Amino acid sequence: MVENDAIITADVDHGLGYTCGMTRIGAFLFRTGLLGLGLSLMASCSDRLNTPYPDSETGANVLYSAFSERPKHLDPARSYSSNEVEFTGQIYEPPLQYHFLKRPYTLIPLTAEAVPRPRYVDAAGNALPDDAPAASIAESVYEIRIRPGIRYQPHPAFARDEAGRYRYHALPASEIAGKTRIRDFGHSGTRELVAADYVYQIKRLANPRLSSPIFGLMSEHIVGLKALGETLEKAAKADPVAALKLDDFRLDGAEVVDRHTYRIRIKGKYPQFIYWLAMPFFAPIPWEAEVFYAQPGMADRNLTLDWQPVGTGPYYLAENDPNRRMVLRKNPHFHGETYPAEGSAEDRRDGLLADAGKPLPFVDEAVFSLEKETIPYWSKFLQGYYDSSGISSDSFDQAVQFTSGGNPQLTDSMRDQDIHLITTVAASLWYVGFNMLDPVVGGGGEDRRKLRQALSIAFDYDEFISIFLNGRGIPAQGPIPPGLFGYVEGEAGLNAYVYEAHDGQIRRRSIETAKKLLAEAGYPNGRNVKTGEPLVLYFDTMASGPDAKSRLDWMKKQLDKLNVQLVVRGTDYNRFQDKIRKGNAQLFEWGWNADYPDPENFLFLLYGPHKKVVSGGENAANYDNPEFNRLFERMKDMDNGPGRQQVIDAMLEIVRRDAPWIFAYYPKSFGLRHGWVHNVKPNLMANNTLKYRRIDPALRETRRAEWNKPVLWPIGLLLAGLAAVIAPAVIAWRRHERKTA
């Protein structure tokens, strides 16, 4: 039940003849002397009951969303999780970004004046042509010029006194005591973004005290980064307390050219590096912020870059209360950026170009409330208190139904509320990995290969998607998801070892085919042909809970079809990770989300030198095929085109035949938005899309009022009855008092 002034007034305005019965009854009770009850009843008509937001936000240009788990890291050198980038993407600005509307995904400038094109040089420093063979390229040089006039958000780290000295860079402990929020500092300032801020952040990737998750990868590519990491490691051990002054250390691969230009040098040819320049890892960090937060006592009060970031983006973190809410507020110093004017005919049809050329951001504030459970979140979304929502399994049937052709559409109740469905195939993959070092399922022999092929057929992920994902997925045909170069649709792109085309339809190969392969592998009817022992396989998982049990039971049933036993070994995350690192798992489930839209970002998961056990890389299956490795090394340096596609096709044929993975599915995301939310288009690469959102607060308030009208007559009736009982006694008592007075 929701009660507030706005709703009550709306009822009166619509001629319903309603006035607050509780007010009238409360006034009567007040007059009769029942002061406390009277006051409480009259006050109940003016309070906004059951709404999760304060009165001050009524009709405000605020977007409402939620989070279920507090982001662990908001420092761009450390943050990598999706729930973290939801915030860091709005606060920090790397030099590049993805065009909001264009598909395929297209890089465009953000703070940079242009997307840099690499210059190639040989070992002697001589310039090479753009089409030079990769083997002849010693370095790729990226020169990035940023736009002048971009400024940081207001922050006390920049505040200066009348003499020009920093106010808060050398605070005594007494002045830090009692301060737990940025706004506890009385002054703030700003300054212009400069090229040195970007170089400073690249150095921070090598800081051992930050343990950046991409340091290992970037040290293979950025000239001198590995050496800088070793130097900083020694300096940190020599003085464990003192802050590392990064400006005192040189990094050959990143240097300032002038105030607004910096240069990055990459070993050899690494075309994918350009995508990293659109990620928060390569966003600028001002040295003033590190000096400010490095002061003794700051970290004890959660005054760190991990808790209170400092950026140039459209929003800054105004509130960070992980037990209640997190608030992003418009940066008053945000530089001029406008909504894109380019898009497809479909974009224009969907109204996604209506705001072309208008200044960004549209929303003044974004409030993220803590919601640990899906049901309360869903209920508040239907009430209009959240602007958008995902769809859990519990609410899926209420929101979505499938046509006879298998296409999803909203239910009538959703359409009646002007709720819109957004679907897209994620640039990610789920797979079941075989440990290729395992003596039973691993190895490159023909018998082991046929065993893995048989199991790949038996695990019916078409059925899994239908049962457990409500149709929210596409059976995977290989390691490259749709939307990325290298993915081929239809019959031409199917995994012929698991699927077959029949009368224009793609279907999974029969279980009889799987049984035949199993017998050829030496396990007829699921028993070892030499010993007669049943084939028992072990599946390691982190899954737990009732939903996980049903999924694991399903997996066991898949192998029951082959008379193969599956033993599930559940464990916690740390133990699972340890097993994978040491190669002690046999079968395991894993997934990967694209860091950037290039097939290399998925194919490297199967590259031999990146084996988990040997090098600690991301090849968790420990797969190592020399021909695949050779083709990968060739493919990764190639530009997109027919030649690269040909190489990728050959690689896909190898991994489909070898089957180091059971290619499970590409997830398909389903989302909902209310009709007052505009400019929503899934962009699986961009993490800074909040600035494009536009809402209609007036329409939202109207809809909330319509959907949450208070039902007060039962209370009024109850109170009227109560008054009828109490009133005679009160009247009699007052008469008695007057007579005895």
Image (cartoon, rainbow, N blue to C red):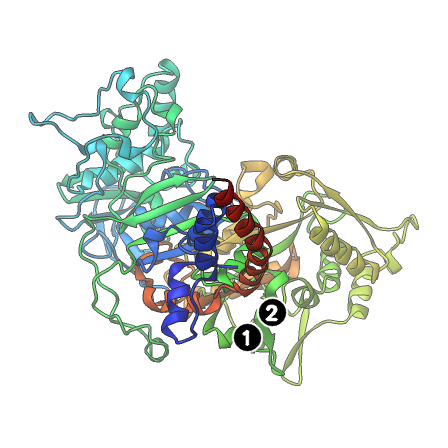
**Residue at 24% from the left image edge and 46% from the top image edge:** 312
Is residue 268 visible to the viewer in this orientation of the structure? no
**Residue at 37% from the left image edge and 78% from the top image edge:** 346
The kind of residue tagged 1 is Ser
Disc 1 crowd rating (10 Å Cα; few below 14, some 14-19, many 20+) is few
- Residues 317 and 428: in front is 317
**Residue at 61% from the left image edge and 35% from the top image edge:** 574
Helix, strand or loop at label 1? It is: helix
- Residues 496 and 96: in front is 96
Indicate the position of residue 377 as horizontal and vertical percent values. 53, 55
Residue 484 occupies quadrant:
bottom left
Residue 398, label in figure: 2
As drawn, the residue found furthest toward the bottom would be 503
Is residue 5 visible to the viewer in this orientation of the structure? yes
Residue 676, label in figure: none
Question: Mark 1 vs mark 2: which is more N-terminal?
Answer: 2
| 1 and 2 marks in contact (CB < 8 Å) | yes
- Residues 325 and 531: in front is 325
Indicate the position of residue 510 as horizontal and vertical percent values. 77, 71
User: What separation in Å lies between label 1 and label 2 (alpha carbons)?
Assistant: 8 Å
- Residues 32 and 17: in front is 32
Answer left or right for 61 relative to 716. Answer: left
As drawn, the residue found furthest toward the left would be 163
Indicate the position of residue 677 as horizontal and vertical percent values. 38, 66
Indicate the position of residue 368 as horizontal and vertical percent values. 42, 50
Q: Is residue 414 above or below residue 213?
A: below
Looking at the rendered structure, the number of numbered marks drawn on it comes to 2
Answer left or right for 261 relative to 550. Answer: left
The kind of residue tagged 2 is Gln
Helix, strand or loop at label 2? It is: helix
Residue under numbered circle 1: 413
Answer left or right for 403 relative to 595. Answer: right
